[in-house]
């Protein structure tokens, strides 16, 4: 509790002046986030509860993470089963049943022939970039290493993934970022010009750009990109960290596109809140990866893998996916009705239970008013509200949140 920041007059004189008063103490948790004031102490279904007992309807789900809601009985039981073994962690030097069962399940339910487990989304994408380069070098082209990302993309905040993230404010203070990464327009002409078989290793795409404003990348464009990458001997990586695992009404978003990627990354809801990610790779990539080519201390440990194995089976349940499609379509109609009634909305985009709403006002003002009324919302850019409720949310619960939303937009 001694984190005071002395500010002698001489130092103040050298510091650029800011309009806000200088804080006299620094927060114990580094100030990289603006957090809402209340302390949250409990979770219950689609609600989070603060220390005063106030309940908040959760349209954020920890940013598309708590897809089964909070305190889900099956998830809690899976955690207890895993803890009862006493084997929380082994490192990847040893085999465990949960990791192998989860990997086999993912292989059986996707295009992939192998899986690498990571601890987060950014880590999954960083790993995918390494795998792409490892494969590219194996083709015999020594200069084949370029990673290409699209305008509007978000792939993470580490050196490689930040280089592939199209957000100037996130990037500029941290240059130089990883080299050999290019961001191009979502346009097949431009991609034809940059996809040189001798230099390009992979293209990475979010089928729905989440942080970039919930922008659905046109399926026609994606199918063209799949053909082009095959033609040019370049890998296609789909980043389904936010839009995958049921969010759009199919287990993987790519199932609705009619083609398969070479690699696919998942994370956010994979263990319903425990930190876990994965890179799914096809046999082309799997064949070139050798012991020592990549590593992680924690990745795929038995506790997380056991919980994730439970979670993926729940998220792949056809009844849940149907619920997401039907309830999501209804939710989109309700958002449109709010837009029509209030005249305060510029555009609505989305599918499944992943929606964005462009508003005239700064999104933060609406989010703050909704928060006061007990509704959790998140933005995706300065003027875009983003809706990512738990996938298990009911129509009645959504209707309650929509009423609060409308009030917050009108206020
Ligand atoms: C959240 C996200 C990431 C980064 O995941 P972290 O776990 O925060 O590192 C990468 N890609 C997409 C599409 C995301 O939504």
Image (cartoon, rainbow, N blue to C red):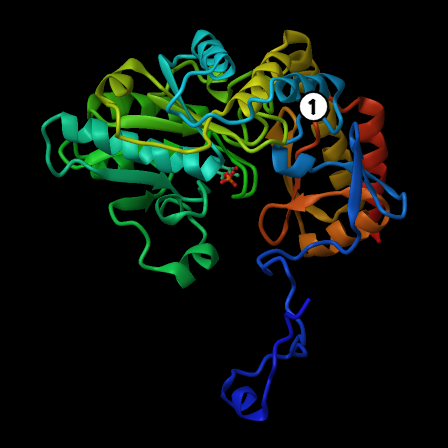
Q: Residue at x 42, y 13 (%)?
A: 258
From the viewer's perspective, tell me whether residue 266 is left or right of residue 35.
left
Name of the residue lying farthest toward the front: 86
Quadrant of residue 249 in the image?
Answer: top right
Quadrant of residue 392 in the image?
Answer: top right
Name of the residue lying farthest toward the right: 53
From the viewer's perspective, tell me whether residue 192 is left or right of residue 27.
left
| Percent x, y of residue 388 | 66, 34
Q: Residue at x 45, y 10 (%)?
A: 104
Q: Is residue 23 above or below residue 337?
A: below
Q: Is residue 221 visible?
A: no
Q: Is residue 183 visible?
A: yes
Give the residue number, with chain letter if any, for mark 1. 68
Q: Is residue 177 above or below residue 139?
A: below
Quadrant in the picture for the C terminus = bottom right
Q: Residue at x 67, y 19 (%)?
A: 324
Q: Residues within 10 Å of mark 1 (few under 14, many from 20)?
A: many
Q: Nearer the viewer, residue 216 or 52?
A: 52
Quadrant of residue 86 in the image?
Answer: top right
| Percent x, y of residue 293 | 26, 30
Q: Nearer the viewer, residue 411 or 5?
A: 5
């Amino acid at each position: 509790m001694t984190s005071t920041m002395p500010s002698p007059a001489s130092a103040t004189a050298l510091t650029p002046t800011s309009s806000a008063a200088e804080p006299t103490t620094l927060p114990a948790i580094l100030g990289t986030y603006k957090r809402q004031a209340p302390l949250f102490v409990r979770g219950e279904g689609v609600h989070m509860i603060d220390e005063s007992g106030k309940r908040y309807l959760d349209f954020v789900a920890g940013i598309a993470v708590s897809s089964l809601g909070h305190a889900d009985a099956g998830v809690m039981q899976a955690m207890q089963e895993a803890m009862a073994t006493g084997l929380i962690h082994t490192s990847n030097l040893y085999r465990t049943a949960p990791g192998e069962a989860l990997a086999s399940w993912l292989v059986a339910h996707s295009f992939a022939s192998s899986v690498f487990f990571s601890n987060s989304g950014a880590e999954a994408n960083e790993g995918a970039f390494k795998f792409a380069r490892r494969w590219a070098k194996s083709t015999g082209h020594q200069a084949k290493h370029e990673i290409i990302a699209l305008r509007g993309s978000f792939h993470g905040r580490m050196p490689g993934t930040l280089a592939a993230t199209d957000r100037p404010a996130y990037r500029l203070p941290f240059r130089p970022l990883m080299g050999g990464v290019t961001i191009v327009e979502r346009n097949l002409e431009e991609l034809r010009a940059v996809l040189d078989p001798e230099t390009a290793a992979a293209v990475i795409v979010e089928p729905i750009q989440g942080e970039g404003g919930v922008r659905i990348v046109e399926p026609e464009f994606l199918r063209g990109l799949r053909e082009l990458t095959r033609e040019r001997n370049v890998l296609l990586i789909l980043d389904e960290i936010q839009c995958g695992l049921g969010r759009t009404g199919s287990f993987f978003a790519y199932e609705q596109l009619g083609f398969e990627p070479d690699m696919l990354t998942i994370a956010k809801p994979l263990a319903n809140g425990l930190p876990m990610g994965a890179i799914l790779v096809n046999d082309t990539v799997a064949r070139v990866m050798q012991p020592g080519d990549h590593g992680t201390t924690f990745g795929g440990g038995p506790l997380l893998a056991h919980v994730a194995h439970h979670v993926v089976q729940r998220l792949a349940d056809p009844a849940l996916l149907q619920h997401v499609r039907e309830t999501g379509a209804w939710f989109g109609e309700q958002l449109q009705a709010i837009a029509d009634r209030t005249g305060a909305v510029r555009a609505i985009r989305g599918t499944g239970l992943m929606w964005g709403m462009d508003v005239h006002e700064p999104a933060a003002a609406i989010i703050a008013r909704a928060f006061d009324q007990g509704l959790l919302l998140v933005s995706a850019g300065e003027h875009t509200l983003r809706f990512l409720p738990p996938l298990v949310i009911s129509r009645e619960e959504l209707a309650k949140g929509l009423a609060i939303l409308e009030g917050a937009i009108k206020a």
